[in-house]
Amino acid sequence: MTRWRYTWRATHVAPWLLGAAISLLLALVHSHGPVAAPLQIGAFLLGAGAGFVTDDPAAETLAPSPTTLRARQGLRVAGAALATALAAVVLASLARPSGIGEAGALVAMTAGILGLNLGVSGVAGRRRGWRHGGLVSGPAVLFVVIASSALPPQWRLLPTGDIPGGWPAICTRWALASLLGLLLLAYSLRDPARSAVNARWWRPTA
């Protein structure tokens, strides 16, 4: 239990708390207007804040410890996912979407943004010694979503508006985005020692 307490103490939660506070403020201000924009902004803020939880400056120092990097990151990611899910429910209850379709699409978008941020921050953090991955993930995911919005509706992989197929298509694409992000995160948490062994195994010999 002590090991997990130290893991939480070393987790960067301030960016997520700031994003949650701004999202809550936007939901309250726009509670009697269109709900899509404030909830979409909230999804980006919550996801970008969650990207910082994978930062682990003590990763190299704690490498020999009984608590593995994968276990520490798993605990952080689980906490961020649970907190983001609760925040999304609160925001949706305040904004009151027009129907189950819109509510489902906004939940799927939140999950997609969260998954992508965790995946990008994991890959970036691994390359940077598990430092500053959160600084990379937010801008990177935002850029990809903006670039996707510039495409014709049927080709938008990360839709923020209507696309052919309606709500089910929107939910499906964001669910796939979340899955892709989680796969990237899992890839970033692979054992470095095993990666080194594989690299030597596949290295061509003279």
Image (spheres, helix red, strand yellow):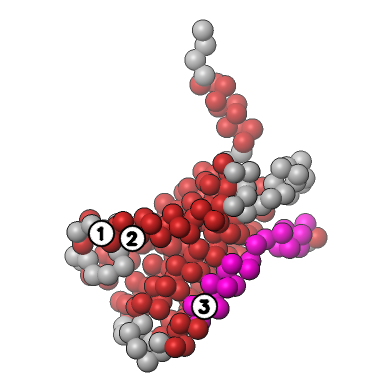
Label 2 belongs to which residue? Answer: 146
Identify the residue under disc 3.
22
Nearest the viewer among 160 and 185 is: 160
Name which residue lies at 33% across and 84% down: 34
* Vertical comparison of 100 with 145: above or below: below
Q: CA distance from mark 2 to mark 3?
A: 21 Å
User: Mark 3 or mark 2, which is nearer the start of the sequence?
Assistant: 3
Which is nearer the eye, 125 or 90?
125
Residue 16 inside the magenta-drawn segment? yes
Q: Quadrant of residue 74?
A: bottom right
Question: In the image, is residue 31 above or below residue 6?
Answer: below
Q: Looking at numbered disc 1 in the image, what kind of residue is underneath it?
A: Ala
Q: In this picture, which residue range is highlighted in magenta?
A: 3-24
Marks 1 and 2 close (CB-CB < 8 Å) = yes
Q: Residue at x 55, y 78 (%)?
A: 21
Residue 76 found in image quarter: bottom right
- Which disc is residue 150 wearing? 1
Where residue 115 appears, as percent x and y from the top left, is: 47, 58
